[in-house]
Structure formats: C-alpha cells, structure tokens
Image (tube, grey):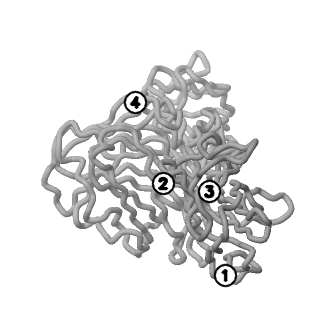
Amino acid sequence: MAAFLNNCRFIPTAGGTTDWVYSSAVGGCQSPALAGAVDGRKYKFIAISGDLTQWEIAEGAYTAASGTFARTIVLCNSSGSGLAAGQSGAGSRISFVAPPNVAVVGIKEDLISIEEPNGFTAGQMAQARANIGVTKNSYVVNGGMQVSQENGTTAGAASGYYPVDQWRSEFSNAGGLSVAQVASSTPGGSPYRIRATITTADASVASSDYSVITQRIEGSRIADLRFGNAAAKTVTVQFGVKAPAGTYCVAIRNGTPNRIIVGEYTIAGGEANIDVVKSVTFAGDTAGAWAFDQTAGMELIFVLMAGSSFVQSPNTWSAAASVFATSNQFNLMATVGNVFELFDVGLYEGSAAPAFQLPDYQAELRKCQRYYFQTAANEYLPISGTLLNGATSGKFSSMPVPVTMRTDPAVTLGASAVVTNGPITGALTAITAVATSHATLMLSLTWSGAGGSAISDALVVFAGTTPTKFSARM
C-alpha cells in the first residue's frame, strides 16, 4: 500500500531505466513538493510515453532532497515484465525512449473494497483502522490505569500490592520499592499511570531476585486467540513506558503456568526517563494447555529485575513454569530513586497494534468490578430471616453487586460492619459470599451480640470509613 497525492504529474529529467527525478510539472498539475510529497514515504506512479506506446506502474520511496521517486517495485508495464498477475514476474524496468509523463496514482490494491477481499498486511490494516478511528479489541483490562478502587493514589511497598485495579506489583529481593497510581497525562490521553519508585537499592542481583508488574487475564477474554492449537494467533503488546536506559523484558504465559514466551525492548539513551511507546510481537502458542473459562487464562508480565533463575532465550515458547526475562534484563533496583512508569497498555491480535484508545471510564470500571469491588461508607443491605447469635446455617441474604463476579469472592470485613434491626445490633464477624449467574451475591453472615439474642427484619450496615472488600481476583 502506498500514499496518495493530489494532482501530482511531472516530467522527469530523463527516460531510460533510471529513477524518476523531477524536472518540471505538467501544465495544470502540481509538482511533488507542492502536492506535499513526504520524504521517505512510498508512492505508486504511472509513467506513460508521449506516443502512448510505453507505460509502467511502479512503487518506490520519495527522496525530497533530489525530487526522486525510486522505481523499486515494478508492478506492470507495456513489456509484460512486471510482478503483477498476468506479467512475467521479473519485475524489471522498461527503458523509456524519452522522458515520459509521470503521475502519482492510487491503484486497486491501495483501496478498501466492499465487493471483494483485500490483501492488506497487518500493518496496513492497523493504519486503516487508525485513519477511520476504529481500534481492535484489547485483551487487557484497565490498560489506561484509570480505575483504582482499593488503593486510590496511595503508594504501597508490599509485594502483592495493587496500585490500580488488575495490575499487581510482585517482588522478592533485598531492595525496596513503592508503587502507586499517579496523576500524569499520557500520550494516549489517560490522566493516570503506574509509577514504581526504588526506595532501597539492590545492585547485586541474586539468582532468585525479581520484580515485576503483572496482570492476569481471564480465560474467557482470550478464547478467540486460539492458543494451544495450530490456529493460534499472533499477538502484539503495545505500551507506554518511562524508565532509565536499558534492555527490558515483557512476557506472556498461561495461567498454569507452564507455557511462556519472553520478548525484549530497549530504552535508548535518548529515550531515557521520557514517555515512549514500545511494542513487542509474539507468535501464538500452538502447544500447551490454555484455559478459556473463568480461571486465569493468560498473564502479562513487565519485568523490572530478574535473577538468573528466571531467564530464558527471547522469542521462543517454552514449558518453563517460572521464567519471564532474558539475561539482558536491566536492573531497575540498582539505584535508589530509579523510576519505572507504565501506561497505555494494550494486548492485540496481529503483528501490529493500533494507537492506544482510552476506554470509557464507566465501562472499564464495570470490567474491573467483575474481579473486585468494595462497599461505600454507611452502605446498607436489607436481609430476611432471623439471625441467631454466632450462627451461620441458613442465614443467607441476596446482595446486589455492580456486575456478575468471576467466582465466589473472598470477603474482607470493614472495621465497623454491623447487623441491626434498631433495638438490637451485633458486630459482623464473618461473611461468606457465593457468586450467582446474575449480578448478585448470596451472603452467609456471622455476627456477635448478647447471648441468646436474635435479630429479625434486619439491615447489614457497612459503616465507617473502612470498606468491606469483595475480591474475585486471580
């Protein structure tokens, strides 16, 4: 596929088999410069002799300094020696007797057809989608780092901390780091990103040392990628990053885990500590077991540090359980104050990714609430039946939730959760939640109060500033 120009037609300096060097514009037409030809961009052009006996359609890049269109790919010509169907396939230039009339054109292969299939490459399809504002589905949840239900913008220093929904910081080493959602506009338009800051250095990387930022993706979200059989599709991870110069790794593995592939990307010296967009493409895995249900189907891993126990060769699927980097991985933990920022993350089918498109916040929040949500202060829930002191058997109540949860959530009670009917109040001591196929949870409640007391026609009150948390994370 080549670019287009409006009404660009000219006479070159010479005929023969040389490239077309601009000499003068044909009357009523524009020169390449006036038409806006871009240096280095590919164009298609047709050359026709003055007596109409010779013609050639070719493709090549434009060089602005000399006004030259390279006749790199000869598609077809009057001698039949082009590469196109019906030609000899030689792709050889014809020798024009005199300087021809050359016009920059678009041909059938450059146009989107509604009547027959096109033969566009993955890169061309990605550009076409970007041109008309259509993007491919990203398999990542909360790639814009907008949603942070549990921790807001509070930094966390423990392994297992979620700076934003679905994104988890995991590490084991002699150093320390904090991670947080920070308000900082990204190239893709998100107001937020994840920032990891090194607080205690670990310059000596032991074999078992590591630090990663990871997201587990539910199997039902990746089913159409067809991993695990011969029809597995290529995927591309595209992301924004701000980090010190060095080689970094990103990995994909299955939920088990026992299938993994690692890719590298480089932050060059001139890119250090500024926002850059990177992409890594992976061939689909044609082997192994990949879950396509509500369990963890895939894990996307961004590596900040990796000891020798976690390394393998790049761009090759393996059956390893705990590798996610190569030996070239930069050690972000080496220096106090090093910062790694991650933003605008997408995982797409194909070998090229579209420009990042920030999801609608409410839609992304609902996706996140399938895996985690928490109550608001002083939120209450009507319940039916009689609750006996300390009893749980048969004491169920239906609780509406924002969306159907992935599985039965683990419940962490807030500090002031109570059950009350007014005259009698008891502190909730435990809740067991069972997910349903609808946007509800069935709750089994345990409460403490005066011995032998009972509460009927009651309310559960999730009071105070400490929320009750429902987690179905993977």
* Residue positioned most to the left: 204
**Res. 204 image quadrant:** bottom left
For residue 279, above or below residue 426: below
Q: Nearer the viewer, mark 3 or mark 2?
A: 3
Residue to which mark 2 is pinned: 216
Number of residues whose C-alpha sits closer than 10 Å to that of mark 2, classed few (under 14), some (14–19) or many (20 or more):
many
Residue type at numbered disc 4: Val
Expressed as whole percent of the image width and height from the top left, the position of residue 242 reads: 35, 41
* Residue positioned most to the top: 423
Residue 12's mark?
3
Residue found 36% across the figure and 68% down from its top:
314
Residue type at numbered disc 2: Arg
For residue 64, above or below residue 163: below
Expressed as whole percent of the image width and height from the top left, the position of residue 427 reads: 48, 27
Task: Using the image as rendered, state which of residue 58 and residue 308 is in the foreground.
Answer: 58
Expressed as whole percent of the image width and height from the top left, the position of residue 398 reads: 67, 38
Residue 182's mark?
4
Q: Is residue 94 visible?
A: yes
Inter-mark Cα distance, 4 to 2: 22 Å
Say which element carries label 2: strand
* Residue positioned most to the right: 115
Tell me which numbered mark, 1 or 3, is placed earlier along the sequence: 3
Tell me which numbered mark, 4 or 2, is placed earlier along the sequence: 4
Tell me which numbered mark, 2 or 1, is placed earlier along the sequence: 1
Residue 89's mark?
1
Residue found 81% across the figure and 59% down from its top:
113
Q: Mark 4 and mark 3 in contact? Answer it, CB < 8 Å.
A: no
Q: Nearer the viewer, mark 4 or mark 2?
A: 4
